[in-house]
Amino acid sequence: MIFNISGFTHLGTVRTINQDRILIQDQILLDGICDFEHVEHCFCFVADGIGGNRAGEIAAQFVLEKLLNWCKNQTEFSEESIRSGLEQINNDLILFGKQNQDHSGLSTTLVGLIVQNETSFIPSAGDSPLWLLRNEMFYQLTENQVVNPYEKDSPLMSYFGGRENNLELQFCTDLREICPNDIFVLCSDGLLKSLSQKQIKAILSSNQSLREKARFLLKKIMEMGAEDNVSCILVEII
């Protein structure tokens, strides 16, 4: 199985701090865009620091750095090992917040896609979604962990960090296999605040390369105003 991966993170046009972070393979980005072509595995995560708490960007960076270090010690992934690793990272973040008064309560969402040897894992916490474009259908695979999914800006029920443990880690079980030409979209909620599902699907369905699609997505987001931080990782199966 071979992948093309392109991702970007941007503070938008209104915010002064980017509280989003992305992790693609072995790189963490706090700004900009990067691409990987013809790689044999996928290790991608988006973390959206929660703006209602202090130091959301520090929480997002903390979690992704811990994830990257954890990954280096893994020879084979399983749901059990991923869950254990993420729960330990959450405990470390809570402890870090308690030990640093300036960062008390820092927290972040997280969504990821790990694929190794044709086995995939999609862990998530919060409202950063993962979408799939397959056979002209574009649909969300993760659930937004919020109090009321029909209410705008509804409070999160699950996240990393905070003053106490509020993590209820989810693993998507709806994806039974990965197919050629699939395109996965991992993003912060800023993406769907700027563009509609229909607009995103149209861009992903074009004949452009994945690199070009990522850059065109970012261009359209900026044209629409981008009032929130926005991060997105596109993963294409080739």
Image: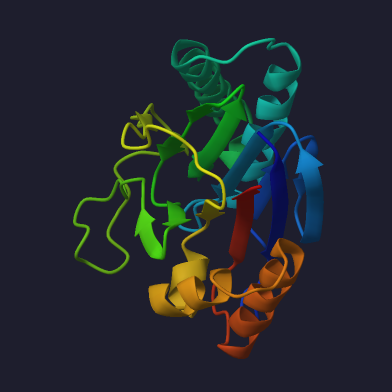
Residue 18, relative to residue 12: is it above or below?
Answer: above
In this picture, residue 212 sits left or right of residue 157: right
Corner quadrant of residue 158 = top left
Corner quadrant of residue 227 = bottom right
In this picture, residue 182 sits left or right of residue 16: left
**Residue placed at 67% from the left, 70% from the top?**
213
**Residue placed at 75% from the left, 64% from the top?**
211
In this picture, residue 192 sits left or right of residue 187: left
Residue 123, relative to residue 10: is it above or below?
Answer: above
Corner quadrant of residue 220 = bottom right
Query: Do we see residue 157 in this rendering?
Result: yes
Query: Do we see residue 162 in this rendering?
Result: no
Q: Nearer the viewer, residue 232 or 48?
A: 232
Image location of residue 70, percent across then percent down: 68, 18
Image location of residue 178, percent across then percent down: 49, 38
In this picture, residue 157 sits left or right of residue 129: left
Q: How many marks?
A: 0
**Residue placed at 66% from the left, 27% from the top?**
67
**Residue placed at 54% from the left, 39% from the top?**
112
Image location of residue 29, percent across then percent down: 77, 50
Image location of residue 129, percent across then percent down: 43, 52
What colouring style does the render use?
rainbow
- Work out which quarter of the rendered image holds the N terminus and state it: top right
Residue 229, relative to residue 156: is it above or below?
Answer: below
